[in-house]
Amino acid sequence: MVSSSDILLDKTEHFEKMSFRNRYLVAGADGIITLSIPVADGRQQRKPMNEVRIDNKTNWQVQHWRTLVSVYNRSPYFEFYRTELETLFLKKFEFLCDFNQESINVLANLLRLKLEFQNTGSFIKHYPETVIDIRTAFRSNQYNLQPERFKPYHQTFEERTGFFPNLSMLDLLFAEGRNALSFLPDQQA
């Protein structure tokens, strides 16, 4: 997104299980932690993303925030971004696409990025070759795909676990702050 001039968000694509549409990865002291946002009707979604509801019966947001505090409290930039991210994680959302959009907006704001988004309005199965379509590029069960593409940065538990590529943008943000932008242009899909 950082190196793109036009960004299309397809909120009409169908929810895909085992994707990063409702999950993200962070590095903990014992390895990778997968944090999943529970969705109503579970993994059996047969709906467009703009209709996928978050299951707010569990207190997933508090659990996610506590995990982030536990893992990143000692990272160089956690305290710098804590307030804005805590506000995001404690705000109630009804729809998954709304939480995802707000997450992107908060990260863009913290990194002082000017991103222009457009919604597609309707499902487009195949884009022209001039469009980089990343809807199927990242699956959570293949997170370690092509680790050599990633420029290493210091991670909180790296001395214990080694470097993990393909983690949530939060990992890079807490480790590098606004310098995170210098790592992004080389990370194209």
Image: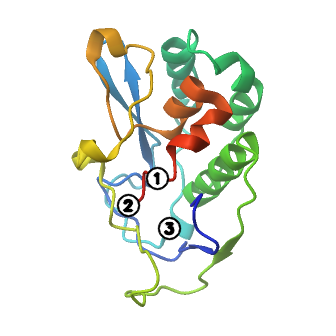
Question: In the image, is residue 158 above or below residue 137?
Answer: above
Secondary structure type for disc 2: loop
Q: Is residue 106 visible?
A: yes
Which mark lies nearer to you, 1 or 2?
A: 2
Counting residues from the start of the chain, the first of labels 1 and 2 encountered is: 1
Query: Given contact means CB atoms under 8 Å apart, are the residues at marks 3 and 1 in contact?
Result: no
Quickly name the residue at label 2.
189
What is the CA distance from the residue labelled 2 to the residue labelled 3? 22 Å
Quickly name the residue at label 3.
49
What is the CA distance from the residue labelled 1 to the residue labelled 2? 30 Å
What is the CA distance from the residue labelled 3 to the residue labelled 1? 12 Å
**Amino acid type shown at disc 1:** Ala
Secondary structure type for disc 1: loop
Quickly name the residue at label 1.
40
Question: In the image, is residue 73 above or below residue 81?
Answer: above
Q: Which mark is residue 163?
A: none
Counting residues from the start of the chain, the first of labels 2 and 3 encountered is: 3
**Amino acid type shown at disc 2:** Ala
In this orientation, which residue lies closer to the viewer: 78 or 151? 151
Q: Is 146 on the left-hand or right-hand side of 59? A: left
Query: Given contact means CB atoms under 8 Å apart, are the residues at marks 1 and 2 in contact?
Result: no
Identified at 31% across, 60% down, the residue is 44
| Rendered location of residue 59, percent (x, y) | 56, 29
| Rendered location of residue 138, percent (x, y) | 33, 56
For disc 1, the neighbor class at 10 Å (few under 14, some 14 to 19, many from 20) is some
Q: Quadrant of the N terminus?
A: bottom right
Identified at 73% across, 39% down, the residue is 110
In this orientation, which residue lies closer to the viewer: 7 or 179? 179
Identified at 29% across, 53% down, the residue is 18
